[in-house]
Image (cartoon, helix red, strand yellow):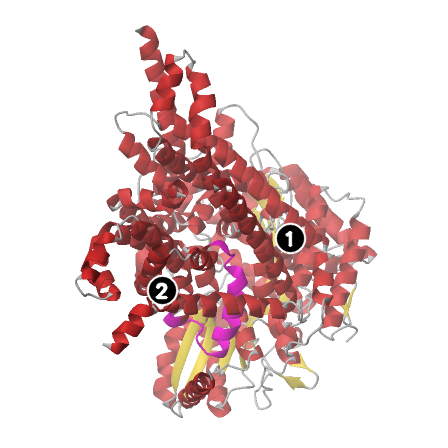
Amino acid sequence: MRKLVRKTLVALSSLCIAAGALAQAPAKEIRVLLANHPYGDLLKAAIPEFEGATGIKVNAESLQEGQLTTKLTTEFATNSSSVDVFMTRPLQEGKMFYKNGWYEPLAAYDFSDYPKNVMSVATFGARTYIVPLVTEWQVLYYRKDLLAGAGLKIPASFDELEAAAKKLNSDSVAGFASRGKGAAAVTQLSSYVYNYGGLYLDKGVAVFDSKPAVDAIRFYGKMLGNYGPKGVTSMSWENIMPLFQAGKVALWTDASVFYGQIIDPAKTQVSVDKVGIANFPAGPKTNSPFIVTSWGMAVAKQSKKKDLALKFIDWATSKQLAAKGMQANITMARSSVWEDKAILARINPGLVETRAFAAKNGYPLDRPYMSAVGEARDLIGELVIDSINTKGVSPNLEKMAKERVEKVNELLQDTGEYGK
Amino acid sequence: MIQSSFTERNLQLLFPLPAIVFVAMLMVFPVLYTSYLSFTNWNLTSGAEPTFVGLRSYARVLSEPRFLHALARTFAFTLFAVVIEGFLGVAAALILNRAFAGKSVAKLLLLLPLVATPIAVGIVFNLFFDPTIGLANFVLQAFGLPPGLWISSENSVIPSLILVDVWQWTPMITLIVLAGLAGLSEEPVEAARIDGASEWQILRLVTIPMVMPVILTALILRLIDALKTFDIIFAMTGGGPGYASETLNIMGFKYSFEYFRMGQSAVILVVLFVVVFGCSLGIMKLRASSEV
Amino acid sequence: MNRKIVSSALFYLAVAAIVLVVLFPFLWMLASSFKTQVDIISWPPKIFFSPTLQNYRKVFGEQDFLKYFLNSTIVGASAVGLSLVLGLPAAYSIARFRQRKLAVFILLARLMPGISFLMPWYIVFSRLDLMDSYTALILSHILIALPIVVWIMSTYFSTIPPEMEESAMVDGATRQYAFWAIILPLSGPGIITATTLSFIFSWNNFMFSQVLSMEKTKTLPIAVYNFLSYAEVDWGGVMAAAVAIMAPAIVLTMIFQKYVVKGLTMGAVKG
């Protein structure tokens, strides 16, 4: 028996040594994790140029966004990571990664080309950890022909939005659509909450049971409950987009990224000239739709080749590649590409205008900004569903909101973020 | 020669040994590790190592309404699905239990749902149930019925999922019962017929009681699998709308791989394990005693 | 006479109804896989449409489905092969030495919810840097295949009369030699049943691969599920992918129909 134990130990330790030897890969080689995102694809295709110019070998893997977070989290948490550079979603995982010390601070990087509200989620304390890549903001998509047919102008306020939705709603066309699927709806609901004067979190404390926030949830539920497509409580963008493409939705609020899809003639039954894009309508209090950094890039704290990693990140977030991204209809975070006339000439003016508006007035968060964001989204999602099911008049909503706020605060306490 | 006789003497240990070691490594140890984690508060998002907290994770999860609903839902889904599959499956087997042209083709077709990839089945039914462009509502409207919301509403999501489960797994009951019927002797049926019993009486009093053990076994197999249903729910609703179709399996998956709450998810997994293990054990005991 | 015709008509009607219900989702899936996105989202659903191959071109051209196909095959074949190596001797031992407890122990792997071992695997494989490796995936799939092999083969071996190897042993052969040279060659049908069935179960498995595989070793079910990619829902492509994943299992079933039925019904009927 003792012999067996000893043998096992020997085998195990030799395994560890072998693994250690493997970890010491050739000097000029880095491991990069990318997302299955148009910009990730663009980078992957361009990597040979970088390798040719620097002689650094890049091992790049592409993963789906959920799997990317899961993989990074487990690798970092179990101290087994060999990742040097990775794409990251600042709002989804930024807080958690920063708090656990998984991001390397980027002291030498020049951030002067990025708008201020975009940088706020990349910076913690005095240091910056994430280079913003892609920006998204909330817009209103609408059917020009339907609005014109009903003699309506583009809704610029929530009241006008409701009136238009009511008028355009029929058996065959939903007057209004927005995500109704619990957790997925939370990001799209956020602009409604802001425009009513509310917030999800304020200084590390959940506050979405405040009057403005609950009013916003009621309004969202009223709109979707009365004028939304059938079964909207199980719909995220992937369910709403085909409806819009099939001509079954008149007004739709969602992120700007989908514009390219809904004007692609190969995918839609509605001709391009009938589809419009406009600023998100104003609420009773203000007009501050979300404009968020949906993707950024960071260097891993555990990386043993930080100099190479920094070289890569400089290249991967450069102005030249950002210009390339814009040409591929990716809405990049750098300011300069939005000022370059040659680039703008090829971009749809609707995107340029709505971005300018959001960049000036928008709010840089679209979800509760915390480590346990997935769970918090599920909790707020329950409120959305209840509100939609009751068309906004749920008698329990205040009480439910209060309970959910307590739970979110509990989550904040669990990870030591409460009140910070 | 000595060595071979050692092998031969210990054959009943040596032959199954590799399989035993494998199952121990990949099943028993992990289950023990999960049980250990259920006594910790390990949370990957906090970056800290697991700390022992006794029964605190149990207290937190077991008092959670979301968990209790998931537990009840798991039983409800299983019970309804298996009972419906039992009735339909036996009925279909009784219909098909005679020689007719095309019987082998019919049996082949019955096999197809059983081998169809569940995740793909779920995705296909997703489009089928879509309230706006799906075929399900078109069929309803063709018969003059009002359209339904299917998996898009809290009230109809579980029945809709049961419908998919019934479609996929009823054929298994049918095939098993058919095989059982084929093995029966003709004598008791002939005897009853000579005594002047009607076809219905023969079915009710002779055939079904004779094939009952086979029916029960088929139902037991289904019951254990239905408790663990994951793929179709994950593909079709992910547990939604809200938590309306969240079973223990789905909830455990979410807690592990979306929330990274390893300690609390371990509690859910332990409960699921105990439920399935308890059902299996109870059933085996029952069968063992009925066989005597 | 009339009554007989009516009852036989009723019977065939019932058979037709059963077959139609079973077959309908398959037919509809097949039809949708040849439709364009515009035809799929049009209402009422189109029965007549001009079929297109664009979905299949997309699945196999742009989406690298051949790679996932290969991954599924590698994982399934290796897991089944190793399960036979582990499972055949165990099944023989269970059958000949009536090791009922051992049988129950291995069958537990079939009964237990996979997720209760999956979470620890995930942690251990991460620590060993085995995530997204064939090793981890094959190990996990053996746990799917092994119980099926043991279940089917132990039943099968017990139908072979013990005299077969006993007569050889009287002639001086060892039991393990008799197992190898006499019993296994007689077990072809059983092995085909076990192989087909356990391969199909491995092929269809979603949960293990969803967690343990990433880009490199991604298997077909994950690829099909992931077809709903960022900012795009392509129902035609999804349907084509669903057809592509089901086709091999269905073809295998058609070829080995007799064996598959036997495997699925065996335990229940034999008790």
User: What is the CA distance from the residue labelled 2 to the residue labelled 1?
Assistant: 56 Å
Task: Say what secondary structure mark 2 lies in.
Answer: helix
Q: Chain of mark 1?
A: A
Residue on which the image places disc 1: A182
Residue ID at (41%, 56%): C221
Quadrant assignment for the C terminus of chain A: bottom right
Q: Return the x and y of residue A117 as percentages of the image width and height.
A: 67, 73
Residue ID at (62%, 70%): B37
Q: Mark 1 belongs to which amino acid?
A: Gly
Which of these two is toward me, C161 or C58? C161
Please check the rendered image and state whether residue C130 is part of the magenta-colored stretch, yes or no. Answer: yes
Q: Return the x and y of residue A266 as percentages of the image width and height.
A: 40, 50
- What span is in magenta? C111-135
Q: Quadrant of residue A369?
A: bottom right
Residue on which the image places disc 2: B12
Which of these two is toward me, B49 or B4? B4
Q: Chain of mark 2?
A: B
Q: Quadrant of residue A300?
A: bottom right
Residue ID at (33%, 16%): C8
Task: Say what secondary structure mark 1 lies in.
Answer: helix
Which of these two is toward me, B17 or C26? B17
